[in-house]
Image (cartoon, rainbow, N blue to C red):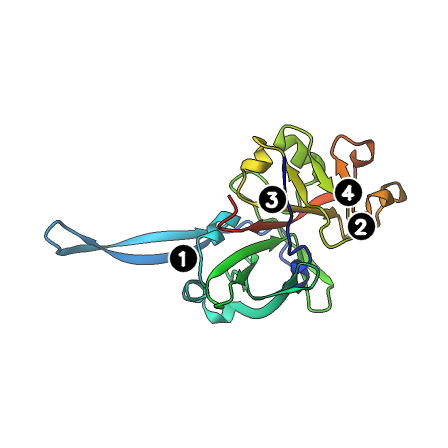
Amino acid sequence: MKIAVIIGLFGLFLFSCGGDTDNTGENNDSEMTVDTIDSTGTSLEEETIEVLYSTFEDYCQITSKEQLISEFGEENLIDGESWYAEGTVRLENTILTNPENGQVIKYLWKEDGNTLNFLEASYYIIDEQYAIQGTQIISSECGISTGMSLQDLKEWNGADFNFFGFGWDYEGGIFEDEGSKIAECPIQIKLSFDLEIEIPEEYFEMYSDQVFSTADEIAQGAPVLIILLTYRPADK
């Protein structure tokens, strides 16, 4: 058993918002024109290749800030910084708001400021005052998505799993059982309580750094969601 601990659990609060983006289902179609070359090296015709941006994995294809600017333009990007590992690690970031479908994706860069370190998709769109401005459904090709309930995640996984409680820096980290669908998916998952509702008192015990299981009685019906997806190129 191994645990995928997402060091940037509070990075989502630095997301910039362009308005409410509830469940944005449209695709962003970006076109690249390439020359078709015959065996003699002669250019025969131009071929247009469509690049679609809809799933989380689509955005993972962008691996540098230079490429991100080329693909979406500086007018759709906001640079900033994020702090991780309990405020001990600072990373430069760029927030993309896809102009075609409103999807908001955060790119975190390595020390050179250009190479992809990892990227995140948050369920909540948070402004600079940490107020929720909306939500978004970002889906992974694995079959998971932001906003997915704990119960639906368990059903998708096909088995119970353990996870950390909530209200601390490493909340919602999931223990990955070898061979499980969660372990095989290259996307890391962070869980948390639904921030848009008042949490019933019977679930207050889950505000802790203890380990819980989806098989626990207290987890049954708990208002817990996937609130963050993270992709790290070197992880899996």
Tell me the kind of residue under disc 4: Pro
Which residue is tagged 3?
A: 145
Of badges 4 and 2, the one in the foreground is: 4
> For the point 64% across and 51% down, which residue is it?
6
Vertical side of 165 occupied by 90: above or below: below
Q: Position of residue 65 (x, y in %)?
A: 46, 65
Q: 10 Å neighbourhood of mark 3: few (<14), some, or many (≥20)?
A: many
Tell me the kind of residue under disc 1: Ser
Do the residues bearing badges 4 and 2 touch, measured as CB atoms within 8 Å? yes
Tell me the kind of residue under disc 2: Ile
- Residue 160 visible? The answer is yes
**How far separated are the C-alphas under marks 3 and 4?**
16 Å
Which residue is tagged 1?
A: 30
> For the point 44% across and 67% down, which residue is it?
69
The foreground one among 25 and 229 is 229
Q: Secondary structure at mark 2?
A: loop
Do the residues bearing badges 4 and 1 touch, measured as CB atoms within 8 Å? no
Q: 10 Å neighbourhood of mark 2: few (<14), some, or many (≥20)?
A: few
Q: Residue furthest right?
A: 201
Q: Position of residue 12 (x, y in %)?
A: 65, 58
> For the point 58% across and 32% down, which residue is it?
178
Q: 10 Å neighbourhood of mark 1: few (<14), some, or many (≥20)?
A: few
Which residue is tagged 2?
A: 197
Which residue is tagged 4?
A: 223
Vertical side of 156 occupied by 32: above or below: below
Of badges 4 and 1, the one in the foreground is: 4
